[in-house]
Image (cartoon, helix red, strand yellow):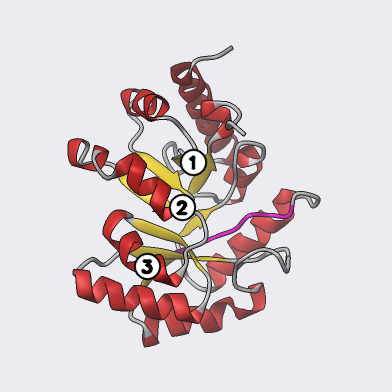
Amino acid sequence: MSTIPENFETIRAQIKKAERMAGAGEGTTNLVAVTKTQSHENILAALSCGQRLFGENKVQEAQSHWQDLKMHYPDIALHLIGPLQTNKAAEAVALFDIIETLDRDKLATELSKEMKKQGRGLECYIQVNTGQEPQKAGIAAQDVGKFLTYATQDCGLTITGLMCIPPLEEPAALHFALLKKLAKANHLKNLSMGMSADFKKAIPLGATHVRIGTALFGQRPA
């Protein structure tokens, strides 16, 4: 069984190879290490590998993982990559550096209010429901432009990218290509797309951030 340091070395090498094959500059794709359900020991192992960019799905779990560690490692950047309830907006703004899952007007309004209150201007990505899945959060592809206008002009948020989670039963590359097209049309520079199983397909289509957990830390405990 591979160790966490070996996994980081392997994934980083695979990202560099995918960048070269895509004709992208080395370092254009950022590795977001997903620490959902991970132990403190596993997180420390990732930090010892020099990893400083992490993704968390839930505010409360992220607080237990990172509240103290962020004081000891001030260069950590923490992305929220899971759904955000409006009643957790204040805690999310206080802890995270980027919110990747902005997906509705009410949340945009609440995040704007909290950022002004706390004096923190976080970047946000719009989550796009590229597969039009009713059970999944995200803005419909055809509504991205309208929602972007609301979030930036009405709420004053800084939107710098898009994020998606493709349907499991469909080719991921089709959804990555759609997200790239939407980002270009709306002049957004960041694309958070690609996970352990499909990040090599996301990089040639312009991923700036790949969210990887299992390939780094192994299967999550039940």
- x%, y% of residue 134? 73, 69
Locate residue 132 relative to residue 39 in the image: left or right: right
Residue lying at 47% horizontally and 24% vertically, measured from the top left: 8
In what element is the residue under mark 3? helix
At label 1, counting other C-alpha atoms closer than 10 Å, the crowd grade (few under 14, some 14-19, many 20 or more) is: some
- Judging by the rendered image, the residue that carries numbered circle 3 is 89
Between disc 1 and disc 3, whose residue precedes?
Answer: 1
Type of the residue with mark 1: Lys
The residue most toward the bottom is 154
Examine the image and state in which quarter residue 136 appears. Answer: bottom right
Name the foreground residue: 46 vs 219.
Answer: 219
- Residue 182, above or below 105: above
Type of the residue with mark 2: Lys
Between disc 1 and disc 2, whose residue precedes?
Answer: 1
Q: CA distance from mark 1 to mark 2?
A: 8 Å
Name the foreground residue: 102 vs 21.
Answer: 102
Badge count: 3
In what element is the residue under mark 1? loop
**Label 1 with label 3: CB-CB less than 8 Å:** no
- x%, y% of residue 112? 33, 77
Residue lying at 29% horizontally and 73% vertically, measured from the top left: 114
Q: CA distance from mark 1 to mark 3?
A: 19 Å
At label 2, counting other C-alpha atoms closer than 10 Å, the crowd grade (few under 14, some 14-19, many 20 or more) is: some
Whether residue 162 is in magenta: the answer is yes
- x%, y% of residue 185? 56, 72
- x%, y% of residue 196? 61, 36
- Judging by the rendered image, the residue that carries numbered circle 1 is 36
Whether residue 60 is in magenta: the answer is no
Dot label at residue 58: 2
Residue stretch in magenta: 161-167
